[in-house]
Image: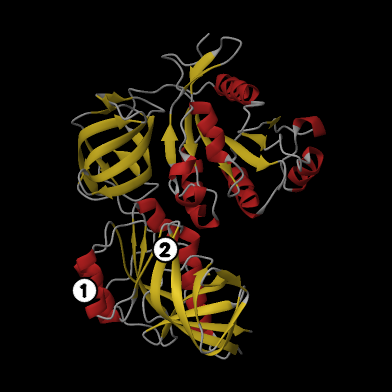
């Protein structure tokens, strides 16, 4: 029996949950594709959509469209946007760690959206699994499992071994049957942008899911007021399509600019949404209160939006955009005395040289929370410069070398004493640009815990810091 037919469309299922609770690994098991390892740090940082055909052991089958939503707090708005597209939510909760911060945020969004939900209790195979404790936490959070008298199905699963996944998929198809999701290919087009990016070879690319109507090659459509003549439709397997029907996830090529995540694509131009904060452009007159001026460049629109929505009012966004760091970004940052934060985008050598000439600091990262922590640390320092710190020691980076692909700083200790585990500032051009910790100290072949003024050593840091020659390391305690 196949659930999907001309009368009903496939269900659109958002997979939500706390960071590192196994959402992407669970989908990997379902679609037999290893996506998680391709993401920096093993953390999903983009929304991705897929439509595998599910075939159960009992012979039942059907298409299901999954949206893999990032779990980090910075992606709260992306999760919210994803929930507006979906018919059903699978909430992944670790049987070891239980209900955590982002789990609670997801539950709130599920309740606000009034969406049906299935809880997948993952990592049930691990020694520390505590199913009953997790069920109690779910009750406290407003999701009462069926076995406790509630209406929320709960399925113990293991994304690693595959245990329980067939039962989870059976429930998804059952919910789709009960909901009777009408297939409406003849209605006016309504599709949602779940991701967008500026591809250097293909131009603006939007990942969308069609909710109503039919999207055809050659159609003229709009994402708000952004024009697009559809040049290509590419499905989640990378194949070209002529049409995309309801519930189909597809990439669209042909937009004149990258549309914002969450935009509705229709055949008619729409007004720009008023609840989206505009970027602060060069020429903005700063308020009397000190604010940290920054320029942000990110790989895709969804990540850019997530970053912008992570910042407090103490941040002044001079400019924000998608794509590689350009000379324009350098000159804008230089005029505003701003730093550039580059998330998962290339920075060419000549751009780095130009930045050095203009005395503009570029901070690069492929892990979003590292960028956010760096910015937050600078804001705290700016807001409360009176925080008392005792300087324990200082050192100057005079060399760098690699052992097993690990960058090691050659440090000359100039003051005091530095110890493994010390909190340290990284200072460049008289400005603190990063806070980190000393991970290890080595002298020759010896691993040591402390080193005093007048000595040289090799030093590693955690979290990773992109140090340069002549940077200063300042060890301190609060």
Q: Where in the figure is residue 338, as x and y percent of width and height?
A: 33, 77
Q: Where in the figure is residue 110, as x and y percent of width and height?
A: 60, 43
Please state if 406 lies on the left or on the right of 452 as rendered. left
Image point (26%, 42%), residue name: 222
User: In the rendered view, would you say 359 is above or below 93?
Assistant: below
Q: How many marks?
A: 2
Mark with earlier residue (1, 2):
1
User: Which callout, 1 or 2, points to the residue nearer the camera?
Assistant: 2
Residue under label 2, please give it: 402
Q: State the residue in front, 21 or 2.
A: 21
Is residue 436 visible from the viewing direction of this image? Answer: yes
User: In the rendered view, would you say 103 is above or below 452?
Assistant: above
Mark 1 and mark 2 in contact? Answer it, CB < 8 Å.
no
Image point (57%, 36%), residue name: 89
Quadrant placement of the C terminus:
bottom right
Which of the 4 image quadrants contains residue 218? top left
Q: Mark 1 Cα within 10 Å, few/some/many (few <14, many 20+)?
A: some
Residue under label 1, please give it: 354
Please state if 387 lies on the left or on the right of 35 as rendered. right
Q: Where in the figure is residue 473, as x and y percent of width and height?
A: 48, 81
Residue at disc 1, secondary structure: helix
Which of the 4 image quadrants contains residue 168? top right
Please state if 430 lies on the left or on the right of 121 as rendered. left
């Amino acid at each position: 029996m196949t659930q999907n037919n001309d009368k009903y469309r496939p269900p659109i299922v958002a997979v939500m949950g706390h960071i590192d609770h196994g959402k992407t690994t669970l989908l990997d098991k379902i679609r037999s594709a290893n996506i998680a390892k391709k993401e920096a740090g093993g953390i999903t940082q983009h929304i991705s959509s897929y439509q595998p055909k599910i075939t159960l052991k009992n012979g039942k089958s059907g298409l299901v469209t999954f949206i893999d939503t990032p779990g980090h707090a910075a992606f709260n708005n992306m999760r919210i946007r994803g929930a507006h597209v979906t018919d059903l939510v699978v909430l992944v909760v670790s049987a070891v760690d239980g209900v955590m911060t982002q789990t609670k945020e997801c539950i709130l969004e599920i309740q606000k959206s009034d969406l049906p939900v299935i809880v997948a209790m993952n990592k049930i195979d691990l020694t520390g699994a505590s199913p009953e404790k997790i069920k109690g936490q779910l009750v406290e959070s407003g999701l009462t499992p069926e076995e406790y008298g509630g209406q929320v199905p709960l399925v113990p699963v293991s994304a690693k071994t595959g245990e329980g996944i067939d039962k989870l998929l059976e429930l998804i198809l059952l919910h789709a049957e009960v909901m009777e999701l009408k297939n409406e290919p003849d209605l006016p087009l309504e599709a949602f942008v779940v991701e967008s990016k500026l591809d250097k070879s293909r131009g603006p690319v939007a990942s969308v899911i069609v909710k109503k109507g039919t999207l055809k090659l050659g159609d003229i459509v709009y994402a708000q007021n952004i024009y697009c003549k559809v040049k290509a439709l590419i499905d989640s397997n990378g194949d070209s399509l002529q049409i995309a029907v309801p519930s189909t996830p597809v990439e669209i090529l042909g937009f004149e600019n990258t549309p914002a995540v969450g935009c509705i694509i229709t055949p008619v131009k729409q007004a720009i949404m008023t609840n989206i904060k505009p970027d602060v452009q060069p020429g903005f007159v700063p308020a009397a209160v000190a604010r940290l001026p920054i320029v942000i460049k990110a790989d895709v629109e969804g990540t850019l939006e997530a970053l912008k929505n992570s910042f407090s009012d103490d941040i002044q966004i001079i400019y924000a955009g998608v794509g590689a760091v350009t000379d324009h970004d350098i000159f804008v940052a230089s005029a505003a005395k701003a730093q550039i934060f580059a998330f998962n985008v290339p920075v060419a050598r000549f751009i780095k040289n130009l930045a050095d000439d203009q005395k503009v600091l570029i901070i690069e990262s492929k892990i979003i929370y590292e960028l956010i922590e760096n910015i937050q640390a600078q804001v705290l320092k700016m807001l409360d410069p009176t925080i008392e710190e005792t300087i324990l020691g200082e050192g100057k980076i005079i060399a760098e070398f690699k052992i097993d692909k690990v960058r090691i700083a050659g440090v000359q200790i100039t003051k005091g004493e530095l110890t493994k585990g010390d909190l340290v500032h990284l200072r460049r051009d008289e400005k603190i640009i990063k806070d980190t910790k000393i991970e290890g100290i080595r002298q020759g072949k010896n691993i040591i815990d402390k080193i005093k003024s007048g000595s040289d050593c090799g030093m590693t840091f955690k979290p990773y810091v992109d140090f340069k020659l002549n940077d200063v390391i300042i060890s301190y305690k609060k």
